[in-house]
Amino acid sequence: MAHSLPWNVGIGTSILASPGRLGSLTPMREMLEARRPLGRSGLTVPRIALGCGNFGGIGSAPELFGQGLSEDQAFALMDAAWESGISHFDTADAYGGGRSELSIGRWIASRGVRPQLTTKTYNPMAAGADHGLRPERIARQLSMSLERLGVDRVELYLAHDFDPEVPLAESFSALDQAQAEGMIGTYGVSNFGPARLAAALAAGAPQAVQNSYSLLDRADGGDLLALCAERGVAYLAFSPLAGGWLTGKYRRGEPFPAGSRMTQRPEPYRAFVSGPVFDVLGRLQAIASSRGTSMAALALAWLLADERVTQVVTGPGRPEHLAPVREALRHPLTDEDRAAVERALG
């Protein structure tokens, strides 16, 4: 594969700053590099992160390890994201059974650049392997993640799920130790609802929560986002396009496209296969068309218009799937647009 990136670009620096290279995209780079506080940690993150859950697998599902994007495809996507100005990559130890972190690490080494990094732990690295948030496991998994990524520190480390077998205080003690040793910038949680986040805040100092949030999955729009705002916790939204449902690829009465999430790992999205959801999608598509954008761009713009959302983690499958990000930034929602979207959602 041809390497197009310069070898001397530092952390958070985009090659778009290079003189004479893609200069027309400089305003886009500035929007992508606009930063928000990461809770009360003193760190900041950009509004958009590249989700790397499909590198070498489909998320953390052991039965799908080795599928998803090949390393060449992952490199092409990271190249395109970096060139667009996306400087934060989001992964997890169990994505692809370690393949995602390995691909990112090899890309960092070959390109000579250093994005900000989020990684996570909880899920097993192979079928039948251990999982959870025991302190000794956190220490082991973090060390292995840093080795795969080829770095000595990640900016954000997340507990990827709630572990009912380990007191949160014990898990957070291990994360506090990792932070004190400089292995992580700060830590947070993922897939925690309001009650569990409240318990986490009583047990330690998580600075972020990363959950699924989109036009079709708005459960966090009430109590959880309110709690984040009250306690100064950064809210990071993953699956902003609801597994592809907000791209328009799934149509009423038609088979799911080959290779789509609904043919690979449909379980999280089966509830969307209903007449009312297709009705909502039709109304959202009409709004998007009236604005001259894709429905995916509308969905991303809706999230970016919410000041309570610190970061949106988007996981495109191909470089061209980054286009809705650019559309969303170029066409922010007006108050009238947001009202129309709320009416469309019913």
Image (cartoon, helix red, strand yellow):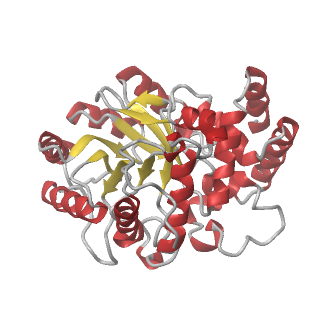
- Residue 288's place in the image compared with 27, above or below, is below
Q: How many marks?
A: 0
- The answer to whether residue 131 is visible is yes
Of residue 42 and residue 80, the one placed in the foreground of this image is 80
Of residue 305 and residue 35, the one placed in the foreground of this image is 35
In the picture, which quadrant includes the C terminus? top right
Q: Residue at x 78, y 72 (%)?
A: 255
Residue 62 pos. (x, y %):
41, 75
Of residue 87 and residue 112, the one placed in the foreground of this image is 112
Apparent side of residue 110 relative to residue 69 in the rendered image (left or right): left
Residue 200 pos. (x, y %):
28, 37
Residue 103 pos. (x, y %):
40, 67
Q: Residue at x 72, y 54 (%)?
A: 247
Q: Residue at x 73, y 31 (%)?
A: 342
Q: Residue 99, located in which quarter of the rendered image?
A: bottom left
- Residue 314's place in the image compared with 125, above or below, is above
Residue 126 pos. (x, y %):
33, 76
- The answer to whether residue 161 is visible is no
Q: Residue at x 21, y 35 (%)?
A: 204
